[in-house]
Amino acid sequence: MKTIPYRCDNSRHKALLGLVRSTGTSVQRLFDNFVTHVIADRQAEARFVVRQKRGNPARGRKLLAEIRSRIEARSKASPHR
């Protein structure tokens, strides 16, 4: 495991300590959750870009049109929704 030092001003430090005390967690866990979220977000974006490059725009438009028509058909069948 590696250590990453983080420097912040006194007001942020005070707010950070107040946050971890109020949530019953630790600074370590708070940062770990944040880093995990950021990494997962970037990985999802990278997967999307790869799939986007492989994608077929014409097929995508056709699928969206089918979805829209199904939604329209449902809303016409039950007007109270």
Image (cartoon, rainbow, N blue to C red):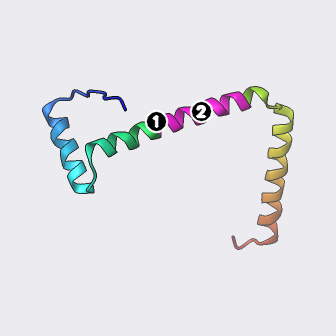
Q: Please report the residue visible at 39 percent of the width from the left and 40 percent of the height from the top.
A: 34
Find residue 48 and report its horizontal and vertical position in percent. Answer: 66, 33
Query: Mark 2 — residue?
Result: 45
Query: What residue span does the magenta drawing correspond to?
Result: 37-51
Question: Residue drawn at (32%, 44%), measured in percent from left and top?
Answer: 30
The N terminus lies in quadrant = top left
Q: Is residue 73 above or below residue 66?
A: below
Q: Which mark is residue 75?
A: none
- In the rendered view, does 65 fall on the left or right side of 42? right
- Labels 1 and 2: the sequence-earlier one: 1
Is residue 69 or residue 23 the one in the foreground? 23
Circle 1 residue: 38
The answer to which image quadrant residue 5 occupies is top left
- Residue 27: percent from the left, percent from the top? 26, 43
Q: Is residue 62 magenta?
A: no
Numbered disc 2: secondary structure: helix
The stretch drawn in magenta includes residue 49? yes
Q: Name which residue lies at 78% across and 58% down.
A: 71
Camera-side residue: 71 or 55?
Answer: 55
